[in-house]
Amino acid sequence: MMRQVQRGPVPPGQRSHGRPGPAAPAYGGGVPQQPTYVDGQGHDGYDDGYDSGYNTGQVYGGGPEGPRGGGPRPAPNWRRRIKWTAITLATVLIVTSVATYFWADSKLHRDVDLSKVIDRPEAGAGTNYLIVGSDSRKGMTAEDKKKLHTGSAQGQRTDSMMILHVGDNGDTLVSLPRDSDVVIPSYKGSTSGKVYPNQGRHTKLNAAYAEDGPTLLVRTVEYNTGLHIDHYVEIGFAGFAKIVDAVGGVDITIDKGFKDKYSGADFKAGKQTLNGEEALAFVRTRHAFAASDLQRTKNQQKFLSALAHQVATPSTVLNPFKFYPTMSAGLDTLTVDKDMSLWDLASMFWAMKGVSGGGGTSMNMPVSGSTGGNLVWDKAKVKTLVDELKNDQKVTVSGN
């Protein structure tokens, strides 16, 4: 420690701190005067007019109230801290939301051009989605096909078709049986661009998709119902199973057990959680039921509603380790029309969730009979249903 050297002469008989005492020998005649060290810093508690700065902290730029002075600290400004914490969290939330939006938007496959659909009916109130589950095996390995019991049929067909109407007077989900008897109208080829005339040809509804894909299916639905389709959404076998697995399975109650060797279904009655493989078997089964196509569409509606409810639970939405894989699995396998936005997709999803929660109507297209194995629609009921959907009115018609 640096010694403190007293400046100036000290009067005889007085010690360096100003109190009487024996005089020190003079310089040159003995040992020089040495400063006293009572407190280890060159002074013994009395003020001699000299401040080394060690006591006050001034050597380091502090003072009695400074960070090294040992004085009281000011109370923290909690209002300011809370404000900046809120601003930081809001900024992180906004940045994350924007990044998620652009990430999700880039994953949508906008491959269907509805501008190629000719002679379309006028659009009505509300929004109509044609939701299609196809038997596409795209991207599936031989092991996947075996595991999911999809077979290896060539081409592509529709296993399920639904019209979802989103409006101000309740949302309506109408299943279109794949065996519905329809007329193939005149249409413009999706690849050739050639117009094929209407020859009055009757066939099953799912044959339209097999003949010329999504645009002919939309054209056929619009022609036979008179209802304008605003958006098209399609998902294949593999994508459906991946979504179910990503969300951790879907809880559903099966009223009556059934088996089907073709789809791989083997279910007991009661509440259970279905994984992707089981869910696909559940929605595809038709051979286990007497009214095969109608019962299958009911199962499809039931399961899709349960899936929408499961995805929208807080345990999925608020868990990034579950939400992003689920979202990614869905977006990777969806095919939509070129004008479909994420907002449209979200609106469709929430409407399906609302229908499952009792906030809308779920039904099959009204059927009056059959011909040649094809289900014939009840023309009077279908006209009433379509008029109510066009005008966005509450649906009064019941289906099969």
Image (cartoon, rainbow, N blue to C red):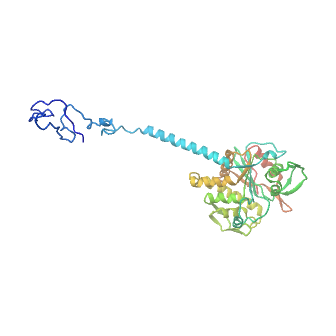
- Residue 4 placement, left or right of 115: left
Number of labels in the image equals 0
- Quadrant location of the C terminus? bottom right
Report which quarter residue 123 is drawn in: top right
> Which residue does the image show at 55% across and 44% down from the upper left?
93
Q: Position of residue 172 (x, y in %)?
A: 72, 50
Q: Position of residue 366 (x, y in %)?
A: 79, 55
Q: Residue furthest front?
A: 28
Q: Is residue 12 visible?
A: yes
Q: Position of residue 73 (x, y in %)?
A: 34, 38
Q: In front: 157, or 387?
A: 157
- Residue 312 placement, left or right of 76: right
- Quadrant location of the N terminus? top left
Q: Is residue 359 visible?
A: no
**Residue 84 vertical placement versus 191 (above, below):** above
Q: Position of residue 270 (x, y in %)?
A: 63, 65
**Residue 166 vertical placement versus 23 (above, below):** below
